[in-house]
Amino acid sequence: MPPVALTLGPVFFHWPAERLRDFYFRIADEAPVERVHVGEVVCGKRMPFSDPVWPEVIERLEQAGKEVVLSTLATPMTVRERRSIADLCGDDRLVEINDLTALPVRSGQPFVAGPFINVYNGATAQFLVRRGARTICPPVELSLAHIAAIAQTCSDVEFEVFAFGRLPLALSGRCYHARLHGLHKDSCQFTCEQDPDGLLVDTLDDQSFLAINGVQTMSAQVHAVMQPASEFLSRGIRRLRLSPHTSDMVQVARIYRSVLDGDEEPERARTLLSNLDLPGTLVDGYARGRAGAEAVATP
């Protein structure tokens, strides 16, 4: 494994089964990522549509040498959803926990602490490590300096930074897509499928503000943290997470890998990234301890 590895996070959006299958098959064959997350994180109602795809996808990814992580729901609402999490936590593969109610059924076995778990200090990180955390992906609003301070207290776990994609900001009990279309959440008709990268929300002044994805609130812009590998390693960060979008994620992964391998300068890599069909402009404010919507820093 390279000094700084690349992870492809779970798909947050409601993509049709065929799209999911084609997407992951191409990731398996072409993307320079070491780890791939699969599974539904945002809305349990989507699971019956995607669940039949996962066995075939997992087999293809593992045959290609990728480590597969089973991601779990961040806000389980029903008994069925909690049972599905318990079933996943019993798997021999690495599991990503995004809600602490999953911890008792996984505790003692290796797991990934996802960005929906509030890890804001070293004590919390150590609590998770004692219960089996192998990787911790802190909340997306933490700066690299803050993550470095936490990492100093936990040398026996790898820290992962959310490095690319619309930022997952909040989850609600209400479905924004359903309400927008005059529907109830229980009869949403899965209207979120119409917006495979989320639906942009503008202010009254026509400024891009947020994006909605069913019950999820996301950033309108695309968070992009890109530095030489040595900068991440000096902060105790050993993984970068790329969040899937309809953009060419193979090319996104290649751009990030070229920077980590020292073959491309971050400034030019950001230009290459911005030339892709991204759902928003590039920002990196949170990584620098600033407002998250601040444009990427330039030398």
Image: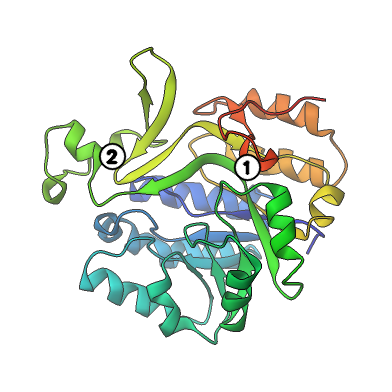
Question: Residue 285 at what x, y percent from top left?
Answer: 63, 34
Question: In this rendering, would 263 be left or right of 80?
Answer: right
Model colouring? rainbow
SS for callout 2: helix
Q: Along the polypeptide, which appears first: circle 2 or circle 1?
A: 2
* Label 1: few (<14), some (14–19) or many (≥20) C-alpha neighbours in 10 Å: some
Using the image, determine if residue 202 lies above or below residue 123: above
Q: Is residue 173 visible from the viewing direction of this image?
A: yes
The CA span between labels 2 and 1 is 24 Å
Image quadrant containing the N terminus: bottom right
SS for callout 1: helix
Please give the residue where the numbered disc 2 appears in the rendered image: 192
Please give the residue where the numbered disc 1 appears in the rendered image: 250
Residue 155: image tag: none
Identify the amino acid type marked 1. Val
Q: Nearer the viewer, mark 2 or mark 1?
A: 2
- Return the residue nearer the eye: 109 or 236: 236
* Label 2: few (<14), some (14–19) or many (≥20) C-alpha neighbours in 10 Å: many
Residue at the location (63% across, 56% down)? 7
Question: In this rendering, would 297 be left or right of 70?
Answer: right
Looking at the rendered structure, the number of numbered marks drawn on it comes to 2
Question: Residue 282 at what x, y percent from top left?
Answer: 61, 28
Residue 297 sits in quarter: top right
Question: Residue 24 at what x, y percent from top left?
Answer: 51, 52
- In the rendered image, the residue lying farthest to the top is 205
Question: In this rendering, would 146 be left or right of 112?
Answer: right
Question: Residue 36 at what x, y percent from top left?
Answer: 57, 59
Using the image, determine if residue 117 lies above or below residue 253: below
